[in-house]
Image (spheres, rainbow, N blue to C red):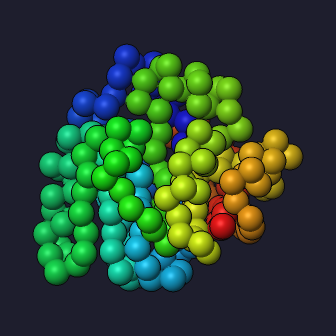
Amino acid sequence: PGRIEQNQRNDIQSEKLTDNEIMEDWQYPLMKAMAEYAAETHGDVLEIGFGRGVSATLLQEIGVRSHTIIEANPYSVSDHYAPFRRRYGDRDIRIIEGRWQDVLDQLGEYDAVFFHAFPLNLAEFVEFIAESVTFAEHFFPTAAKLMRPGGVFTYLTTEIDSISRRHQRSLFKHFREVCMKVQPVTVPPDTRDAWWADSMVVLRASL
């Protein structure tokens, strides 16, 4: 969730990352819980950040009507998305390459928005992690605009067992209802990520 090591680089948008640099395996339970929220209506899902395709595969296994994916890293597209897409040849899946900020004019309305992205450079890390309640906070207003009434928004909260008052206030500026649960995780001692706790709040915000 933090990706501090990566963000000491100038810009990782176009770098070829290892699987663990994209997402470590300990995050799988979080991805599964988030995918269950996002796919609960089996409707049209927008996913921000494909990475290794872990969450995308979970969404397809649960079943959704359509699946739109935004991914900025060309190596994630060629090395991970391409084989994923071949496995689901008859499904309504499409990818939009680029940063979400640059492709909004290509998007419609969705029943769920699944946000699993991380900072692409040090400036984004400072602005959207160090100075925010959670990295996804800067995406809250955009997520709300992209969702149909009753739509679901989920993201990595980086909160251990509850969410702060500031986090709540930020959410309720854009969403009508929030529900959450605590998801246990097992973070290995040699993790390269910034997460250290044995749990994280998984959250579902809706209009």
Q: Quadrant of residue 201?
A: bottom right
Q: Is residue 32 left or right of residue 10?
A: right
* Above or below 19: residue 34: below
* Above or below 50: residue 119: above
* Above or below 102: residue 175: below
Of the pair 92 and 81, the residue shown nearer to us: 92
Of the pair 83 and 140, the residue shown nearer to us: 140
Q: Residue at x 59, y 24 (%)?
A: 127
Relative image position of residue 73 (x, y in whole percent): 27, 39
Residue 99 in view, yes or no: no
Relative image position of residue 37 (x, y in whole percent): 57, 73
Q: Quadrant of residue 6?
A: top left
Quarter of the image with the N terminus is top right
Residue 95 in view, yes or no: yes
Q: Residue furthest front?
A: 105
Q: Is residue 189 left or right of residue 99?
A: right
Q: Is residue 9 left or right of residue 135?
A: left
Q: Residue at x 18, y 66 (%)?
A: 85
Q: Residue at x 61, y 31 (%)?
A: 129
Quarter of the image with the C terminus is bottom right
Relative image position of residue 42 (x, y in whole percent): 45, 82
Total marks drawn? 0
